[in-house]
Amino acid sequence: MNTDIADFIRRLPKAELHLHLEGTITPATLVELSARQDRQPMTLAEAESLYRFDDFTGFIEGFKAVTRRLIDPEDYELVAWRMMERLAAQGVVHAEVYISVGVIYMWRNFDPRALEPIFADLERARERAERELGLSLYWIFDAVRHFTVEEAARVFRKAAKMRAVHPSIVGIGLGGDERRTGSEPFRALYGRAMNAGLRLTNHAGETTGPEAIWEALGIGSERIGHALSAIQDAKLLEELKTRGIPLELNPTSNVRTGVCPSFAEHPLRRYFDLGLLVTLNSDDPAFFGSDLLNEYLLAHTTQGFTREELRQLARNSFRASFLPDSAKSAWLARIDSTE
Ligand SMILES: [Zn+2]
């Protein structure tokens, strides 16, 4: 029966909206990168040790260490292509992918010219995926909130400037450690990004309470990543529902970083039943040992999502995407006719 449902989930056209490029790099790919670069290449065991963590802080450290191994533009092209192949194999037809531009700058002494050659190779992978895999993909430039506001400004200015040439850059976001910095300091930057035509996403309420989500909404965030703690605040749930704010949920990620006890206890089901615009996502699949297909499957096995409800989750993923309306309608029709 689970094979049946897994096949159905694979056939359903899906969009993934909360996925970090660097979080898709597997230990095996890291070994491959190291073999290109290091006189003494990393072993698989050494690579795997970077993926071991017990909490959110440990996860962030591992994420930074893996990102540090991406050196040449070709490294980015390789990991992007691998990510795209895996997305297509899961029946994902559209993805909106975070690039940790803040971390790219940090490892390159904030050289403003560091990004262009990397981005050119990422675009090459994206165009190839569009041609060969039928996958459409947008990029979201992610800044690290617990660096300084000036560093985030650098990332967002770059996004605004490059967007003029590369329409695949659809928006901006803030990741990093919410416990250290909220959203309010970025209010002016979000306003400017919006005026530049960028869409506004934001991680909020992952390791923090509902007040962090209010704050994110207050600075104009259009989509909320995680929103785990919204469940604690009835007024906030009402607000999210009335405004139809898309939530990018990542249940397995939350379990693995220790902010949610189990998939079964994740508020996904309650949000869905309340009529919120929830989407399922994998966040950093290589770190959390899941992928989008598996998140849908777990929604079925642990929270009793029926076929029709899974279909609704797939519909939500397109409604919440930044695709043009014509593309949304086309995918929604395809979902309706998927058996
Ligand atoms: Zn994330």
Image (cartoon, rainbow, N blue to C red):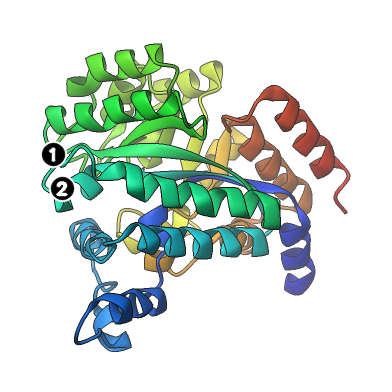
Identify the residue at image location x=62%, y=39%: 317
Q: Is residue 47 above or below residue 216?
A: below
Is residue 302 visible to the viewer in this orientation of the structure?
Answer: no
Residue labelled with disc 1: 147
| Amino acid bearing label 1 | Phe
Identify the residue at image location x=72%, y=58%: 9
Q: Percent x, y for residue 1?
A: 78, 72
Q: Is residue 15 above or below residue 296?
A: above
Res 44 quadrant in image: bottom left
**SS assignment at label 2:** helix
Q: Is residue 218 above or below residue 70?
A: above
Identify the residue at image location x=29%, y=43%: 115
Name which of mark 1 and mark 2 comes first in the sequence: 2
Res 60 quadrant in image: bottom left
Residue labelled with disc 2: 106
- Looking at the rendered structure, the number of numbered marks drawn on it comes to 2
Q: Are marks 1 and 2 in contact (CB under 8 Å)?
A: yes
The foreground one among 253 and 37 is 37
| Amino acid bearing label 2 | Met
Image quarter in which the C terminus is found: bottom right
Establish whether ligand 1 lies closer than 8 Å to the Cβ of label 2.
no
Q: Percent x, y for residue 31?
A: 34, 80
| Disc 1 crowd, CA 10 A, few/some/many (<14, 14-19, 20+) | some
Identify the residue at image location x=21%, y=26%: 153
